[in-house]
Structures are given as structure tokens and as C-alpha cells.
Image (cartoon, rainbow, N blue to C red):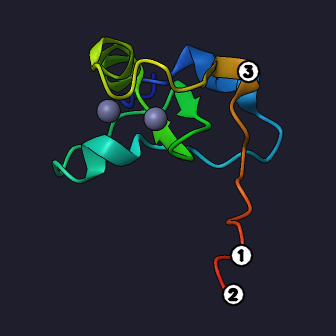
Amino acid sequence: MATNRKENVHENKYRRKKRQIFCEACQYDDSFEEATGFCVTCSEYLCQTCCRDHKRNKVTRIHSLLKNDDIPSDITPPDFMC
Ligand SMILES: [Zn+2]
Ligand SMILES: [Zn+2]
């Protein structure tokens, strides 16, 4: 009996106890897209679509984006207390 749940093939690559990361921008829109990028400037995870939008937007196109393997698995939030 085959599993009726469609397995994501790409998951195997990220097996090492990495939790799934979702695009933060899309979550504001109530959709859960797997993050494929990370904006260093915004410290925000972005999906493929949002990465593209990030590069298109005049304000955000200069931001440093990390892709796929380069995205941090977990960002330790900087201390904003001062
Ligand atoms: Zn997105
Ligand atoms: Zn950004």
C-alpha cells in the first residue's frame, strides 16, 4: 500500500533535525509556503515568490538574500533590549 501523502523529495536533503521553515511574509497572508530564502537585512524567511518580489521591490532589492543551503536553520533573535 502506497502512502497517499505525497512526500517532498527535497526533504531528504534537509534531514538533519531541521524543522520546516515557512515564509514569514506569506504567513501574514495566511498561506504557508516553504521558505527557500532568507533576507539578512530583514532577518526574515522568504519563499521563492517572495524572494523574487524582494529583488523586484525598489526598497528591498538591495537587501542581502541567502538561498537554499545558505539560509540559517534557526536564527537566534538579536537582543533588542537596551
Ligand atoms: Zn512568501
Ligand atoms: Zn529584506
Q: Tag 3: residue type?
A: Asp
Name the residue at the left extreme: 29
Query: Which residue is tagged 2?
Result: 82
SS label for mark 3 = helix
CA neighbours of label 1 inside 10 A, class few (<14), some (14 to 19), many (20+)? few
Q: Are marks 1 and 2 in contact (CB under 8 Å)?
A: yes
Please give the label number shown on residue 45. none
For marks 3 and 1, the one nearer the N-term is 3
Query: Which residue is tagged 1?
Result: 79
The percent position of residue 17, horizontal first and vertical second, equals 79, 47
19 w.r.t. 82: above or below: above
SS label for mark 2 = loop
Answer with left or right where residue 32 lies relative to residue 28. Answer: right
Confirm if mark 2 falls within 8 A of ligand 2: no
CA neighbours of label 2 inside 10 A, class few (<14), some (14 to 19), many (20+)? few
For marks 2 and 3, the one nearer the N-term is 3
> Which numbered mark, 2 or 3, is in the foreground of this view?
2
Name the residue at the bottom extreme: 82
> Which numbered mark, 3 or 1, is in the foreground of this view?
1
* Residue at x 69%, y 87% (from the top left corner): 82
Disc 3/disc 1 C-alpha distance (Å)? 25 Å
Answer with left or right where residue 71 lies relative to residue 27. Answer: right
The percent position of residue 49, horizontal first and vertical second, equals 31, 19
